[in-house]
Image (cartoon, rainbow, N blue to C red):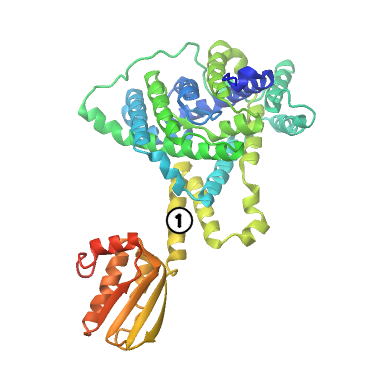
Amino acid sequence: MSSRPAWLASPRVLRTEVLAGLVVALALIPEAISFSILAGVDPKVGLFASFTMAVTIAFTGGRPAMISAATGAVALVVAPLVASHGLGHLIAAVVLGGVFQVVLAVVGVAKLMRFIPRSVMVGFVNALAILIFTAQVPHLVGVPWLVYPLVAVALAIIWLLPRWTSVVPAPLVAIVVLTVFTAVAHVTVPTVGDEGKLPDSLPVPGLPDVPFSFDTLRTIAPYALGVALVGLMESLMTAKLVDDITDTRSDKTRESWGQGVANIVTGLFGGMGGCAMIGQTMINVKTSGARTRLSTFLAGVFLLILVVVLGDVVAVIPMAALVAVMIVVSVGTFDWHSVAPATLRRMPAGEIIVMLVTVAGTLATHNLAVGVVLGVLAAMVVFARRVAHFAQVTSASSGGEKVYRVHGELFFASSNDLVHQFDYAGDPGRVVIDLSAAHIWDASSVAALDAITTEYASRGKQVEITGLNEDSARFHENLAGKLGAGH
């Protein structure tokens, strides 16, 4: 069996990966410049970060074909640090953030992905699609009228060309056609060059220009932790989304420490840090059909070549072409099935609420990580309310004793109702609580059982708890009577 990479074994796959990397590189340029401005740094800081992130993660990442680069979420985290302490502290925070990500990967942070419900994932995807679309609106307001037909033409090319051929990615064709037209016709419309000055030299490695002291560490640590957490959350969520699209599995732990290594490298090359970019990843995976690490690597390489060597050519690309590409990405990213009337009628209200909380939190803060955290918290509340009343109690009298049978899961939410389902005054002198159809999950449940036995004991009545499974019996034996009154 051949061990050669898929792109090396197939010319068709190689062509797909190369062209996908080129399209992604073109789409990265205005995004990286915008995020640099958002963070308060020179455009080259974001562009170099995108180059080093993409190239490094192509080797260290756990999700092939996923694109990592400078992102808006990281820019929002570090912007206050840049404003108060300057670029040197930003670079130091990025390096330390990468170290934090490696440490979090080692302690198993990737395993937390199993606790993110589908409704949060749907909200994450829909919020992202909305953010991608709204980010294009400024490029469509207060611009020459010719921008609108140019965007329409680009959209038509991107949507219609695949019906005839898929040899060349439709977004790349749209970019080339609009660039050639505006250059030949001498049309004046906003271009990539208008977004910011492109660098004309290669990035140079070096240590952050900051005092290596405890005061510096204390200053950058909170921002570094923010970079680490936001970056990991967006990267792992994006990896899970690509897993679903490609019907393959990725190594989330490797992706976690790979992001850390990429941020360390990025910081040492003077970049602003970053994480997975879901918009560019969708261009690479969904629009262009890339599936291997080669497309990610080439996206970074092409980006550097385009901005350093071919900067004058890239500068004349009309923003209308890139806006059209991102609009198509936003439309394709949005989960339209999730908001279809038929789906909403079948979906439990709690699931819809969780999705809406995730979307609203993301749109309000322009931070996908915040939206996901709020969505998970909402899902926890919905779940707790849903199962709080699952514990049911039935009773029967037999031979001078009362037998209560408890059915369901006993934890802090359900056990609160448990103590109110017994007839303490009217029951005979012997009471049996049968838990063979129940399971004890936490100390709150043991405390509730203690409260029940204490209540009966205060009336001179004997209580026997039976039917505990092995785990519940061990839990009950360790804690019963040892939690203190009222706890």
Residue at point 64%, 57% (across, down): 343
The outermost residue toward the right is: 164
Q: Quadrant of residue 147?
A: top right
The percent position of residue 288, horizontal first and vertical second, equals 65, 28
Work out whether 222 lies above or below 389. above
Residue at point 65%, 39% (across, down): 332
The percent position of residue 190, horizontal first and vertical second, equals 63, 25
Q: Quadrant of residue 244?
A: top right
Q: Quadrant of residue 193?
A: top right
Q: Nearer the viewer, residue 191 or 171?
A: 171
The percent position of residue 98, horizontal first and vertical second, equals 37, 29
Which quarter shows the N terminus? Answer: top right
Q: Nearer the viewer, residue 446 or 43?
A: 446
The residue where tag 1 is placed is: 378
Q: Is residue 316 in sight in this rendering?
A: no
Which quarter shows the C terminus? Answer: bottom left
User: Is 74 on the left-hand or right-hand side of 448?
Assistant: right
Tell me the crowding category of disc 1: few under 14, some 14 to 19, or many 20 or more residues within 10 angstroms, Cα based: many
User: Is 150 on the left-hand or right-hand side of 349?
Assistant: right
Work out whether 312 lies above or below 37. above
